[in-house]
Amino acid sequence: MKLRDRVVVGFCLSLVLVTVLFVVDLQNENNRRLANVENVVVVSGSGDGGTGDVGIGMHGRSDRTRVASHAQSVWNAAWSTLMPFRAVAPDAAATVSYQSRSQRLNVPQPYQQYRARTAAEDYPAVPDPHVDDRFTDLVVRLSESDSSVPHRGSAIDWTIVKDVIVDDTYNDGTTSNEYVVEYLEAASKSNNTSLTVFHSRISKRELYPENDTYVPLILKAMSGLPILSVSQKEGGTQLKLIIEYLNGDKALMKPMRFSREQQTLPNHFYFTDYERHNAEIAAFHLDRALGFRRAMPVSGRLVNITSELMAQVTSSDLLKTFFVSPDRNMCFHGQCSYYCDTSHAICGNPDMLEGSFAAYLPSQDVLERKTWRHPWRRSYHKRKKAKWETDPNYCEIIRNVPPYNTGRRMLDIMDLSVFDFLMGNMDRHHYETFILFGNDSFPIHLDHGRAFGKAFQDEPSILAPIIQCCHIRKSTLEKLLSFHNEKKLSERLRESMAEDPLTPILWEPHLVALDRRVGFVLQKIRECLLAAAAAAVKSNEDAASFLIHGNSGDKDEETDNKHSNSTIKKEEVATGTKINS
């Protein structure tokens, strides 16, 4: 080999060696920086009196004071940079990451303070202005014999009803009621399940009577019976599974996505919010506590994804969405409009998963249902508003349109708004009724997965039907007053949900919010009564003024005076107000 070739080869080898040494040096520097962070120790006491463990660097030096002070200055600088953006807490994923990292690295306090707020104590207390208000005026109003005009039965003409508190019961205190079994030939079978018997007992007024003995049996069956088949429910925006049990009964399962503490993400619209399995369970118990009984029984259940779900799947399209995550958890995502992909998969721990199981309604072949567009439906658009949000007289339109112009439907919509407001459900676009009972059937309370998403924020717009129409069913008002002044709604609900296999069902701040919202509804009823009283006084004054001065130019003064006095007397009897003539 010539000298020139030897020089070239030696030069190339030198370049390679220098490059390798440079890369190794960079790697060592990165390792030293990482070690400095991972071995941070906050010095306690004075500079020479600390008793904390010594942080050892890559070279075996004692770097406790230097590393701690350096890390503290770095975190302080980062904290001052992040402070202006602290108004919105990070999402749930960031929450888990930040908390686990802070525990692992034992980082200084400023970074600990920036963790996402998931614990109730991390949020400012929401004031309850009505906590000490006994609403005595409403209690007195209900106790008076003329507290509400008794619009007996269902023949109510809502074009003329002006009363705030409406009593739609008969003279004996009951409402008209008819049962499914009276219309259908329900053949008595020895193999009838609790659910099929439950279906035959559905009435025009409610799904089941108070203290029904079949509801506990259905809840127990859904939480314990072996699963025969699993399929995906078609339609809807998020994943729901149809569960068929060994005895032939069916339930609708909504799987768990998040923990109880996860709230609605601040940048999510109501129509893109995730559905919560525990919201379905809590909604059933709330509906029952309010005395509506218009929601099907719902139970929680812990299932094995591998043996109870995947092994029973009947569709290949659903089956191929099951997979094992990098963390060795069993996951699946199904097929739907929102959140049905690998990045939004539903995962077990490692294959155990919570879910809500709602009992199936009778099939459409047995008991047909009609779907109605909710009159106070939201726009479901990022920028547009619904008509009721811009028209203050919107209720006058609704009260003149069937089926809201007569019967019980108007009061049922008021009940539904109270129900949705208490649990913060903005996703009420349609409702269903049983065709068998005509327009005098109650609306079925279905689909509450997006409820209980904001424990520290109330949404008054959900109460738009009551605020704009100023009507409420007398029995509903009595129930709300009892929850405010006697046993709290949160206590009643906590006791009811304690029977569920997945208890506790609700995060404690949601229970606190229920009591706060009860007071808010009562305040709106009070404002309606005050507005109605002011309108009545003004109407009486106008009538009296017309009666006194309107006939002064007539020739037959004596006849007119007699007529005027007679009319005034009638006004005095009707209003209880003395009119000076």
Image (spheres, rainbow, N blue to C red):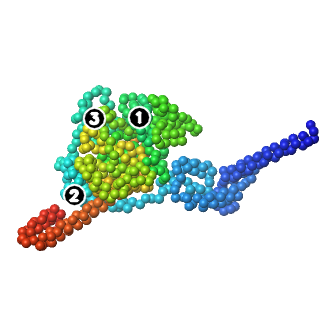
Where does label 1 land, which residue? 242
Q: SS for tag 2?
A: loop
**In the image, what residue type sits under mark 2?**
Ser
Residue 493, image x and y in percent? 37, 48
Task: Indicate left or right for 150 with 525 as reference.
Answer: left
**In the image, what residue type sits under mark 1?**
Ile
Task: Indicate left or right for 95 with 417 as reference.
Answer: right
Q: Is residue 328 above or below residue 67?
A: above
Where does label 2 land, which residue? 147
Q: Earlier along the polypeptide chain: callout 1 or callout 2? A: 2
Q: Nearer the viewer, mark 3 or mark 1?
A: 1
Marker disc for residue 200: 3
Residue visible at 21% across and 55% down in the picture? 160
Q: Earlier along the polypeptide chain: callout 3 or callout 1? A: 3
Label 2 close to label 3 by CB (< 8 Å):
no
Q: SS for tag 3?
A: helix
Q: Residues within 10 Å of mark 2 (few under 14, many from 20)?
A: some
Q: Nearer the viewer, mark 1 or mark 2?
A: 1
Viewer-nearest residue: 342 or 43: 342
Spatial distance from mark 2 to mark 3, Cα to Cα?
Answer: 37 Å
Number of marks drawn:
3
Q: Is residue 227 visible?
A: yes
Q: Is residue 212 above or below residue 75?
A: above
Q: Residues within 10 Å of mark 3 (few under 14, many from 20)?
A: many
Viewer-nearest residue: 16 or 375: 375
Spatial distance from mark 3 to mark 1, Cα to Cα?
Answer: 22 Å
